[in-house]
Amino acid sequence: MTQRQALFVGGSWVEPDGGHYEVIDPATEQTVGWAPEASRDQVHAACAAAREAFGPWSATPAEERAAVLARAADIVRDRVVPYAELARAETGATTGTARAMQVGVAAARFRRYARVEPAEWPIPPQINEAGPMGRAGVMGALAVRQPVGVVTCITSYNNPWANPAGKIAPALAMGNTVVVKPAPQDPLSVYRMAEALEAAGAPPGVVNVVSGARTEAGEAAVDSPDVDMVSFTGSTAVGQRIAEVCGRGMKRQLMELGGKGAAIVLDDADLGSAVSGIGTTFSFYSGQICTAPTRVLAQRGIYDRLVGQLAAYAGRLKMGDPREPDTVVGPVISAAHRDRVESYVELGRKEGARVVTGGDRPGLPTGFYVTPTLLADCTNDMRVAREEIFGPVVVVIPFEDEEEGVALANDSDYGLIDYVWSADVARAFRLARRLRSGGVGINTVGRNMEAPFGGFKKSGVGRDVGSYALHAYSEVQAIVWPG
């Protein structure tokens, strides 16, 4: 393809100062398109446009803002086939994943935040005695959600539809304006999202998209004086650097960072359920997802059986062209990331892990593929058990009893989502309450999309999803009056 994408700034499509860079299909290694490289000045111009648009947009009735989101949802659904094809080409996701979990989820998120929710709620009146502050009286109060202002949304490469929509939709619903800095590997989908919002009636400057393969664009989107909040999804290391800049400017933050999810499989668990859940690490986004159950803690009584069944499961998965309907494992995002994942597998070998299956490249003519890999006989102090690999690699660690299982699970720098498999649901709930993570899945890797999402420890700051996202993109104002 020779199409050269323009930036979207202040309602206009603008040629980038820094030229264009190539976006590569990780399955075919062919060019998908050419993404714009924004200059620092252009990013700051986008932030200034968002600042100018903030006043009118925040004053727009919530019902009208919701109507824009509803129309955007309809447009995305109507264009699901071409949008999904672009997402598949940019990310290497299978066609089914691109349609349902990328574009489909994005449309659902726009639709979700087209539902107007109350932005104010009463506080019980307080009786005040006479004193230095005045006469005795009854004080009424109201808590009101107000928009934060201009929000920079920096999004991850693993889902260029659902992740940006999960930031943009609640931010706009609350009356904020946004500057979106997509991941450099797959930004073209986010520009299609901007087109849909423009067609849906989003006024100029309410949504801006700036991209770049260099760090300059992202840094400018964070340090601009026009930005009030940064919403970031990505690695903990980058999140820490962003937080330092935000701290200097007292900017609000929402951070969804790394994960190393522990999956505790107890000796009474349904192993079929556990294997199919843990096995999603091999296939879903090829393990490039922070919520994946990548660190399996298996009780001794079922350890050998679980390792054997996981190995058999991985060996049955069809790897190949994501366009083929029976493919379930696609490539990772880039050659550099493939090298990184492979280096972790080799590190695991050196640390003493046993490579039960995988650990090599499949014999495919093109593409950045990593064979689903299972590392057994691991210990919790190995780097492969402590660091986020972000690929189709699962490590298995044995434990003796519940106390040891919980201790191992909590012995991590991360705390995004953990999992517990047990036939005794009361037992599983008891363990879940002891885990230091933002979420716990019991006998499932599924999600409730109204439940709060975010992490403990180095897995992030804040919560979003459902109504929690509306709180995340708002400030709470108290209004008090005498009764």
Image (spheres, rainbow, N blue to C red):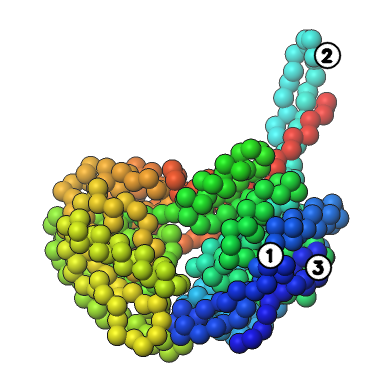
| Amino acid residing under circle 2 | Arg
Residue 335 showing in the rendered view: yes
Q: Nearer the viewer, mark 2 or mark 1?
A: 1
> Quick one: label 3, few (<14), some, or many (20+) residues within 10 Å?
many
Q: What element carries label 2?
A: loop
Q: Which residue lies furthest to the front in this view?
A: 18
Q: Which mark is residue 135?
A: 2
- Please report whichever mark, 3 or 2, sits nearer to the chain's N-terminal start: 3
- Where residue 373 sits, quadrant-wise, is bottom left
On the image, numbered disc 1 is attached to which residue?
38
| Amino acid residing under circle 1 | Ala
In space, the residues marked 3 and 1 are separated at their CA atoms by 16 Å
- Where residue 233 sits, quadrant-wise, is bottom right
Q: Is mark 3 on a helix, strand or loop?
A: loop
Please report the residue visible at 41 percent of the width from the left and 81 percent of the height from the top: 367
> Quick one: label 1, few (<14), some, or many (20+) residues within 10 Å?
many
Question: Which of the two residues, 31 or 468, is positioned nearer the viewer here?
Answer: 31
| For residue 482, above or below residue 419 | above
Please report the residue visible at 14 percent of the width from the left and 63 percent of the height from the top: 304
> Quick one: label 2, few (<14), some, or many (20+) residues within 10 Å?
few
Q: Which of marks 3 and 1 is in front?
A: 1
Taking the image as shown, residue 63 lies to the left or right of residue 244, namely right
| For residue 144, above or below residue 105 | above
**Residue 468, position as x, y percentages in the image:** 59, 51
Where the N terminus falls, by quadrant?
A: bottom right
In space, the residues marked 2 and 1 are separated at their CA atoms by 59 Å
Q: Nearer the viewer, mark 3 or mark 2?
A: 3
On the image, numbered disc 3 is attached to which residue?
11
**Residue 156, position as x, y percentages in the image:** 53, 63
Taking the image as shown, residue 327 lies to the left or right of residue 209, namely left
**Residue 60, position as x, y percentages in the image:** 84, 57
